[in-house]
Amino acid sequence: MNDVQIRINGKVREVAAGTTVSALLQELRIRPETVVVEHNRKVLSGEEFSATTVADGDELEVVRFVGGG
Amino acid sequence: MLAADDHRYRRQSLFPPIGLAGQRRLGAATVAVVGCGATGGATAQLLARAGIGRLVMVDRDLVAEDNLHRQVLFNESDAREMRPKAEAAAAHLREVNSQIKIEPAVAHLHAGNIDELLAGTDLVVDGTDNVATRFLLNDWAFANTIPWIYVGAVGGEGMLMPVAPPHGPCLRCLLPEPPPPGVLATCDTAGVVGPVPAAMGAMAATEAIKLVIGAGEREPRLRSIDFWHWRVHTIALPVRQGCPTCVEGRFEFLEAQPGSRLTEICGRDSYQIVPRDCGSLDLAWIASRWKGGNQTRSKSFIRIEEGGMRLVLFADGRALIEGAGEAGRAQAFYDRVVGA
């Protein structure tokens, strides 16, 4: 499958076309229940992670919950 | 007690959005800072300087040497004497501003004492280092329609979101359930760059001033800041469908029975035990019957050292245990001292 180029938190990354946000988080070893994900500036609900696939030029912002203080 | 046109606040009331009217509102306000460590200490200091009329400071922990790189209210003698953070912070801030009321509480905030400890507050600022207390604060804020500001800092990052009941979004729109232990990075696992929590505390103090004078954002935003790589991100967090707290008004953390709980405290090899039945212990009696290890007493706690472990026991039965290495050893030491 072809790779597409996306930006995650400003950094360019190549991923396989058709990759879902869920799969991407797994690849990045990020627990989905501890992050907010913006896909092209739109906040995704947790249920949308597995239903959303990334396309060439997409911008993702993955914001992790910060617990310390 | 507090004159808004007092010379000391002149440079602040000169800022038009605050003005003398805003300064008077600050002087009439009660703000609680829960957790007086790195973020909370910075917030409390700036709010005391800003002339908040009554400052309630809650903290369960004692000052330790490895707090000093980031916790701006404490000095080496506080760490040497292991002073309770709330008391050390209050003593420091009374020298900063003698014109305001500063009320320290050396306590672990839980469902059973939150109403009493936060009574009369107009705003709560989060200086905690754990998710459990934040979920409790979130519930309490919606049950009482009092705004609170979530603040977090770890590593080189920080996060902040004002929460303004009765409207969402709230903490549980951001994080629906408390993650299992070990999932979130803590100051123990990821470390923390000293100035980061102080910077977050300063931002929280600015938000607190805005909220008190009625200048907060109409729709509060989540702000995530990576200080190390200079990435600042603002998110218009939507209200989560079916959110138990801000949509359905179910306050399960506020209604939870406080059980005996053993928790690890962020920042060092330290455990806290909060007993189920939070009656009052006779510290003098416990001290007199203890025959092992060295012990010292202060008016609010006894400290017992044995075999490389150090236990500090408060009159409400709560204890902090250092040097145990693992939870079971900490619990066992507690049980031997208290006779549980």
Image (cartoon, rainbow, N blue to C red):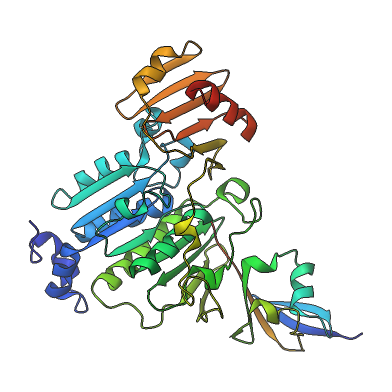
Q: Position of residue B281 (x, y in %)?
A: 38, 28
> Does residue B196 appear in the picture of this structure?
no
Front-lying residue, B152 or B176: B176
State the image coordinates of residue B37 (x, y, percent, origin top left). Answer: 41, 47
Classify B267 as above or below B200: above
Q: Quadrant of residue B325?
A: top right
Question: Residue at (59%, 26%) from the top-left corner?
Answer: B332
In the image: residue B20, left or right of residue B236? left
Residue B45 visible here: yes
Residue B208 quadrant: bottom left
Quadrant placement of the N terminus of chain B: bottom left
Most extreme residue toward the top is B291
Q: At 74% from the left edge and 78% from the top edge, which residue is drawn? A: A21
**Position in image of residue A55 (x %, y %):** 77, 88
Count of numbered labels shown in the rendering:
0
Seen as rendered, the residue at the extreme right is: A1
The answer to whether B322 is drawn above or below residue B72 in the figure is above
Residue at x 66% of width, y 80% of height? A60
- A56 or B151: nearer the eye? B151
In the rendered image, the vertical position of residue B27 relative to residue B261, given as above or below: below
- Residue drawn at the location 54% of the way across and 36% of the way down: B270
A13 lies left or right of B176: right
User: At which x and y percent is residue B338?
Assistant: 48, 24
Closest to the observer, A10 or B167: B167
